[in-house]
Image (tube, rainbow, N blue to C red):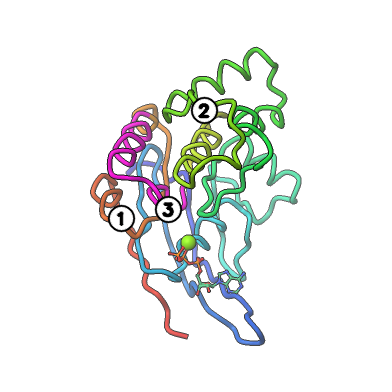
Amino acid sequence: MPEPIIRLEHVEKAYNSQGKLLKVFEDLNLEVYRGELLAIFGPTGCGKTTLLNLIAGFDKPQAGKIYVKNVEIGSLPESRLADFRRKHVGVVFQTDNLVPDMTVFENVELPLVFAGVGRAERHRRVEEALKAFWISSYADRKVSTLSVGERRMVSLARAVVTDPEILLLDEPTDFLDALTVDLMISSLKGRLMRGKTLVATTHRGRLVRVAERVVRLKKRLP
Ligand SMILES: Nc1ncnc2c1ncn2[C@@H]1O[C@H](COP(=O)(O)OP(=O)(O)OP(=O)(O)O)[C@@H](O)[C@H]1O
Ligand SMILES: [Mg+2]
């Protein structure tokens, strides 16, 4: 049995919404193995984004433990958690958080600036990431002038530019036409071949068909 790179044990997550407790996960157990593409599939509101936020450490469970690379991320102080995430995890958010006033190049370069990578190496890696998602031709465009689908590709390039071991993708196929989805999947598959681990949420068929494993979440009734 391969070793899991991500492990969730008895995770409980609830939100307090206007005085009402909304339970999303009561006892979630999940293992993600090194080098696999795992699809998280389920209807709107079932907890897909919540699950990725928990794995990335942006959100914390009320109970249970989450291990990433054998580190219990709940035990890390905020500064070490940010550092850990920067080193090992790339995230593509469902609603992107690109900086609209900066160019595509500058947005993709940002994680490398934070990681203290030198200028020449930064340029080499940004160019490679832009090429991987076919967006080299709009490197100098401001993000605010791009279409939603184009922005999605920029988010993908930014998530892979540090070559993280783990990629968390929230609805990566949204806003993309079928051909672009295929191009994106082939680029992601190249990463799998190099031993990276991908967790992608989706409510569409295409990603589910190419994933090695699919976890289906159900929406809990309030
Ligand atoms: N900050 C929050 N406060 C209160 N409730 C929240 C919060 N974030 C999420 N929820 C609720 O938790 C449930 C799960 O939300 P989540 O965003 O994880 O769903 P999802 O599966 O990603 O949905 P979608 O397919 O629409 O992206 C939803 O019912 C949502 O309303
Ligand atoms: Mg979501």
Which label's residue is closer to the chain start, 1 or 3?
3
Which region shows up in magenta? 169-190
Residue placed under numbered mark 1 in the picture: 214
**Amino acid type at mark 3:** Glu
Callout 2: 10 Å neighbours few (<14), some, many (20+)?
some
How many angstroms separate mark 2 from mark 1 (CA)?
34 Å
Left or right of residue 48, residue 69 in this image? right
How many angstroms separate mark 2 from mark 3 (CA)?
23 Å
Where residue 176 appears, as percent x and y from the top left, is 37, 46
Q: Residue at x 51, y 55 (%)?
A: 52
- Disc 2 + disc 3, Cβ < 8 Å: no
Q: Nearer the viewer, mark 1 or mark 3?
A: 3
Which label's residue is closer to the chain start, 2 or 1?
2
Is 1 contained in the magenta span? no
Left or right of residue 180, residue 56 in this image? right
Where residue 189 appears, as percent x and y from the top left, is 33, 33
Residue placed under numbered mark 2 in the picture: 138
Where residue 9 appears, as percent x and y from the top left, is 49, 62
Under tag 2, what secondary structure?
A: helix
Residue 188 against residue 172 in the figure, above or below: above
